[in-house]
Image: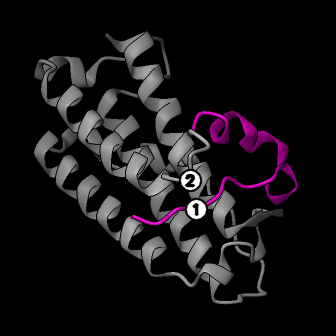
Amino acid sequence: MRLIAKPAPDEYPAYAEMYIKLVPGDGLVLDHLARNFEFAKNLVLSLPAEKLLYRYAENKWTIKEVLVHIIDDERIYAYRAMCFARGEKTHLPGFEQDEYAINSGANERDINSILEEYEAVRRSTIALFNGLPESTFSNTGIADNKKDSVRALLYHLAGHELHHLNLIKERYL
């Protein structure tokens, strides 16, 4: 896979640092995405079915909801990256993650269905970024009233996944 340099701090909003810092700076972010999916899949399939519906505190998401949230977030951030790579000048909207989770129906879904979607989205994300011209990784745009570069969006979505996988290991197991 190709090397994609880690973004500079001026390429993303300050809040995104918590995600971006979790991703190694070796430029192999697409490889990390492929391996992280396999880790997530193996982790989730090792758990008893009832654990997938566990909430570590009131109003916290279940593991199934967390997985669908990761999928939703990846779709949105990859879409933003595609738009900015193509030169989109229109400001893109934000999204309300808690409303998405409430309306996801994740807890009623079979875990294999969730993992199938997760894998499809992940393959699509990797294919998108593998196909972008090198010159587009520094393109920027505005989404949710915040400026991001294409490469920052990629690192954000990779770090966001790691953040949630870490939370699963720390609070759900």
Which residue is under mark 2? 27
**Is 9 part of what is drawn in magenta?**
yes
Which residue is under mark 1? 4
Q: Nearer the viewer, residue 132 or 118?
A: 132
Residue shown at 51% from the left, 47% from the top: 158
Q: Local crowd at mark 1 within 10 Å, few (<14), some, or many (≥20)?
A: some
Residue 44 image label: none
Residue 98 x %, y %: 54, 42
Range of the magenta residues? 1-23
Q: Amino acid at mark 2?
A: Gly
Q: Against 117, is 133 above or below?
A: below
Q: Amino acid at mark 1?
A: Ile
Residue 151 seen in the current view: yes
First in residue order: circle 1 vs circle 2: 1
Residue 82 x %, y %: 56, 79
Residue shown at 84% from the left, 43% from the top: 14
Q: Against 59, is 162 above or below?
A: below
**Is 85 part of what is drawn in magenta?**
no
Q: Are marks 1 and 2 in contact (CB under 8 Å)?
A: yes
The mark tally for this picture is 2
Q: Local crowd at mark 2 within 10 Å, few (<14), some, or many (≥20)?
A: some
